[in-house]
Image (tube, rainbow, N blue to C red):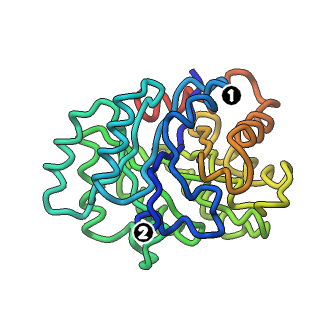
Amino acid sequence: MKIDSHLHFWKYHPVKDAWISDEMKVIQRDFLPVDTEPLLKENKIDGCIVVQACQSEEETNFLLQLAEENNFIQGVVGWVDLRAANLEERLACYSQYKKLKGFRHIVQAEPQPGFLLGEDFCRGIAQLQQFNFTYDILIFPGHLQSAAAFVKLFPQQNFVIDHLAKPDIKNTDFFLWEKGIRALARYPNVYCKVSGMLTEADWNNWKEDDFTYCLDVVTESFGPDRLMFGSDWPVCLLAGSYKTTCTIVQGYYSKFSTEVQTKIMGANAVRFYKL
């Protein structure tokens, strides 16, 4: 089974979605399952994981409703306030939804560099395992050092790094990123999504070779059992297309065995998210 481990849906609102700047006009509109299903079929993708883009329980409920209405949505990574005093109650409530697989917080937007290590946040993360929820880590390279300290605290919790932790592909500035990503990969409970690369490159002038070094690093560091393909659609439209994201990843891994390709293009996501 081929799985896209990372895409988004939203009903665009200029205030709620203020992160979508005027530079990103191509995605200043609604993106819903009716837009996505033909792309998955065209690229022979069997299903997907939809990931939160807004930090509210309303967003989580919206995605769960879409998942209920569309069988190709295999799982949801939602949002819940992991620092809330009533978190256990909220997790117990959400555990009733079979397609809710885990949660994410937009850590890259938090002003505190050590946000992941905050006492309230860590107390929340410690409660995820009892409900079998995963956690997606969305960070920049500057967060990688604290991310390693963070995952060390939770050896039984399943984590996945979104978008390779956003290496600076455009400027080929990989020193801090490579050091941090290799350190993080030493923890066997940490996976990595091969996603979001297009928007870290020069949107208008990237070449397929621009992604090779970063793919080499994560493939060597995480190995074939802890990597999973994700399109980051529709954000990828800023620098390409859905097909482009598939072509880059499948092209790179075409030199690997069929078994490795099967793992990265779906089997690892199935195992990680318990699809």
- Please state which amino acid type lies under the numbered disc 1: Asn
Between circles 1 and 2, the one closer to the viewer is: 2
The residue under the point 39% across, 71% down is 115
- Please state which amino acid type lies under the numbered disc 2: Val
- Residue 15 has which mark? 2
Q: Quadrant of residue 27?
A: bottom right
- Residue at disc 1, secondary structure: loop
Q: Is residue 38 left or right of residue 17?
A: right
- Residue at disc 2, secondary structure: loop
In the rendered image, residue 75, in percent from the top left (x then y), is placed at 41, 34
Dot placed on the residue nearer the N-terminal end, 1 or 2: 2
Q: Is residue 231 left or right of residue 30?
A: right
Which residue is label 1 attached to?
Answer: 43
Q: Give the quarter of the figure containing the N terminus.
A: top right
In the rendered image, residue 3, in percent from the top left (x then y), is placed at 56, 30
Q: Give the quarter of the figure containing the C terminus.
A: top left
Answer yes or no: is residue 212 visible: yes
Spatial separation of the CA atoms under disc 1 and disc 2: 33 Å
